Amino acid sequence: MKKSVQVTYTIAIIIAVVGLLLFVIRKNSENQQSYFHNQGYIFGTYYKICYEGHENLHELIKQRLQSIDQTLSMFNPESLISKINRNEEVTTTPLFEKMYTESHNISALSNGAFDITVAPLVNAWGFGTKLGNRQDTQVNIDSIKNFVGYEKIRLVDHQLQKDDERTILDASAIAKGYACDVVADLLREKGCKNFLVEIGGEVVLQGVNEKGKPWRIGISRPTIDATGVESSYQEIIESTNICLATSGNYLQYYYDNNGERRSHTIDPRIGKPVHHSLLSATVTASSCMRADALATACMVLGEKEALNMIECTPDAACYLIIAQADSLRISTSSRWKVD
């Protein structure tokens, strides 16, 4: 009898130990995280996203990216911004309104150098969704400027009102940065502490990479090789927490009939392509959407005015690359420091 009780007791202990081991194994499995790599194509460019987590979130990420496309893409005829540009009666969404508010803020901060109503001028100079005559040196600027200007639109009760129905919006200089923020917010919601989100050169990163080291990102050198591909980096940045965007005017341009170089960066205040030596502006800010818009504003303003604007913006810093004879010169704001 005693032997039977002993055997039963031993079996009970074994079952308890096995159960405890299975519980520990299950818990360890639940806590174990892996680095996932997602990539794809959106907004006419490529995205790469790397994050440490319990599951692959690519389907959710694609849904969030599609929500930006359905709201802000000029190339999607069914997007909210396309319907606004066609003067259809639509109700604006929180996604659109957040973009609009930040755009208006940066427009005011840059004295109109950044302006989401610049699209008609971009089109007229041969860039954008409706290409003008790239050889025409006599674009009718004055007539177009009558319906270009951030002060000629406003949000009222979730409706975008225009002073002139010919005004159209272009969010391409802020949408990629905004999308990076949206994806980064999703990753944080899902408990990811280490991630890098990159969409067409705009970046949000946090934490460390798979090797446990700071993330490494490059600022491109404004030169191209014989194949038309950027061939090197001006500087490599290592960071564990940054929102960064870069804008440049050295890749998209053409020469008109008079041999004059026309940059795709249009100054909405004067209605013409910019003419200055600033080739590239990289900006860090409290959000990637903000950095994206500020980088575009810098490219419109040129070196001196860009530095003045950034110095007056407490949450921002910039790294500028300027053409100087046959070389490049670097100019940074006082707060430029990446860590």
Image (cartoon, helix red, strand yellow):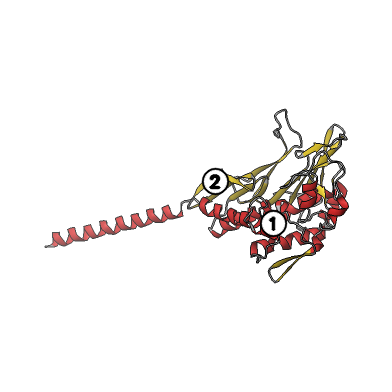
Q: Which mark lies nearer to you, 2 or 1?
A: 2
Q: Is residue 47 left or right of residue 250?
A: left
Helix, strand or loop status at disc 1: loop
Examine the rendering and report whether any part of residue 254 can be seen: yes
- Residue closest to the far bottom: 157
Could you tell me how far apart the alpha carbons at marks 2 and 1 are, in whole angstroms? 22 Å
Quarter of the figure with residue 186: bottom right
Q: Sequence order check: which comes first, mark 2 or mark 1?
A: 2
Indicate the position of residue 123 as horizontal and vertical percent values. 77, 48
Indicate the position of residue 146 as horizontal and vertical percent values. 85, 58
Q: How many marks?
A: 2
Examine the rendering and report whether any part of residue 270 can be seen: no
Query: Residue placed at 71% from the left, 51% from the top?
Result: 172
Mark 2 residue type:
Asn
Identify which residue, 238 or 64, lies in the foreground: 64
Marks 2 & 1, CB-CB < 8 Å contact: no
Query: Residue placed at 55% from the left, 60% from the top?
Result: 189
Q: Is residue 322 left or right of residue 2?
A: right
Task: Using the image, determine if residue 17 lies above or below residue 278.
Answer: below
Label 1: which residue?
287
Numbered tag placed on residue 38 in the rendering: 2
Mark 1 residue type:
Ser
